[in-house]
Image (tube, helix red, strand yellow):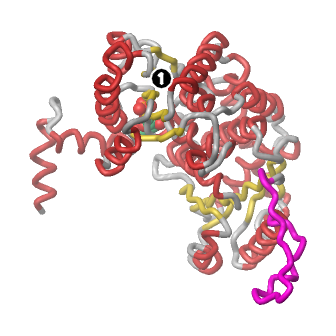
Amino acid sequence: MPLKLDDRYLKGFISQHEYEGIAPAVKCAAGQLMSQKGQGSDFLGWVTLPEDYDKEEFARIKAAAERVKKNSQVFIVIGIGGSYLGARAAIEFLKSDKYNDLPKDTPDIYFTGNSISSTALQELVTICEGRDVSINMISKSGTTTEPAIAFRVFRELLEKKYGKEGARQRIFCTTDKAKGTLKQLADKEGFETFVVPDNVGGRFSVLTAVGLLPIAVAGCDIDALMNGARRAMKAYTSTELDENDCYKYAAIRNILYNKGKSVEVMVSYEPCYAMMNEWWKQLYGESEGKDQKGLFPASVVFSTDLHSLGQYIQDGRRQLFETVVLIDQPKHQVTLGKDPEDVDGLNYLEGRSMAFINEKAFEGTALAHNDGGVPNVVIHASDFSEDTLGQIIYFFEKACAISGYMLGVNPFNQPGVESYKKNMFALLGKPGYEDQKAALEERIKG
Ligand SMILES: O=P(O)(O)OC[C@H]1O[C@](O)(CO)[C@@H](O)[C@@H]1O
């Protein structure tokens, strides 16, 4: 079943003539994207990736995943941003946010190199003690500090445990096909490598080896994932808004942004979607937040966060709209039984499934938030299958590109992230940053 955008909770916030008003801008953005004439057009490899991905490498990914499944109890995935969020989000969506704790015949999977916390790193080293471990080091640039630090620690751990040759069989590197420190290191040490294509940016890379190897190690069907993405690629081509929910979502975001909404809150009613929210936040935040423009992407999981951020969304500053992703078919059903004494007063729900209760929670919340002045865009997906996930990924990637072009930014660069890196390198005394060091230290002294 294809994704379905439901606009009933936008009534009173967007009128038909506003869709008509923005339609030419959507067409223009789609033209820029599909003719490859817009800004950042060197990074459009993801557009046709579901069809023209490297089939030989895809087979190698599956073979590597089978080897890891057989010889490892723990699989450590090292990467940050687009080099980790998509894989983790997919595994939690398809399997569970409690994947490591549930019974399974695949390795535990841990993600590291996504912070500089020695506490987090050391805890993971402890978890690996006495267990068979393989590593996937992922960095498109091959130079990012956070994963490089973690890789140094885990490479040493594996070499101590298995010897150089043994470790070599257990280390997989996903990086640029030719350049970067990681590629050089992998070639020198003889680690198996997988490629992040030049024309696919980090946040658009989940359907390359970046996401596919960890997802396959978790026992997910990566063929079905690519099939779903391919179906979305074929489905979202019309430039008519009422025929293309992907472009309609991009249009709605821009209509609401233009009338003063500055924060988009991604809402899910499933805890296993929380990391998909994180993946989406990087996708939209890095793509649109530039030139002093862009919606701020935030996220919540309901009903959990209705008991924390719910107050603000209902009643705080009115700069928000919500995008709700609803998964129609839960992975597991739970139905409420009867308590003869009804001490908890829940007998009125006897025989009701939790999915039904969750649905009523959503409907009640959407209406309440509408009453509080918060528009809701709703996107229905049918289930937690690989096929559906492939569609969701492609839907948000393509909508992001269209939306970014409508906003007038280059959706495919991220110049802003360099600022913290430069300062950190200078403060750490990295060669080449000597001039900035003294000035920064002076500012810190105050
Ligand atoms: O894969 P890399 O090159 O290590 O980059 C990781 C992440 O860092 C960023 O470049 C930001 O610094 C993201 O765009 C990217 O997803």
> Callout 1: helix, strand or loop?
strand
Residue 433: horizontal and vertical position, in percent?
17, 35
Identify the residue shown where x is 83% and y is 41%: 244
Between 327 and 198, the residue placed more toward the observer is: 327
Q: Amino acid at mark 1?
A: Thr
What residue is disc 1 on? 174
Crowding near the residue tagged with mark 1, few <14, some 14–19, many ≥20 C-alpha atoms within 10 Å: many
Q: Is residue 212 visible?
A: yes
Identify the residue shown where x is 62% and y is 41%: 91
Quadrant the C terminus occupies? bottom left
Q: Which residues are magenta?
A: 330-354
Left or right of 251? Residue 239 is right
Residue 268: horizontal and vertical position, in percent?
68, 59
Identify the residue shown where x is 78% and y is 63%: 14
- The residue at label 1 has a CB less than 8 Å from ligand 1: no
**333 part of magenta stretch:** yes
Q: Is residue 376 above or below residue 78?
A: below
- Number of numbered discs visible in the structure rendering: 1
Q: Quadrant of the rendered structure where residue 283 is?
A: top right
Residue 211: horizontal and vertical position, in percent?
58, 31
Q: Is residue 413 visible?
A: no
Quarter of the rendered structure image containing ligand 1: top left
Q: Quadrant of the rendered structure where residue 310 is?
A: bottom right
Residue 198: horizontal and vertical position, in percent?
51, 19
Q: Is residue 429 above or below residue 22?
A: above
Identify the residue shown where x is 68% and y is 33%: 220
Q: Is residue 162 above or below residue 297?
A: above
Query: How would you classify the magenta stretch by its main secondary structure?
Result: loop
Quadrant the N terminus occupies? top right
Q: Is residue 373 above or below residue 383?
A: below
**187 part of magenta stretch:** no
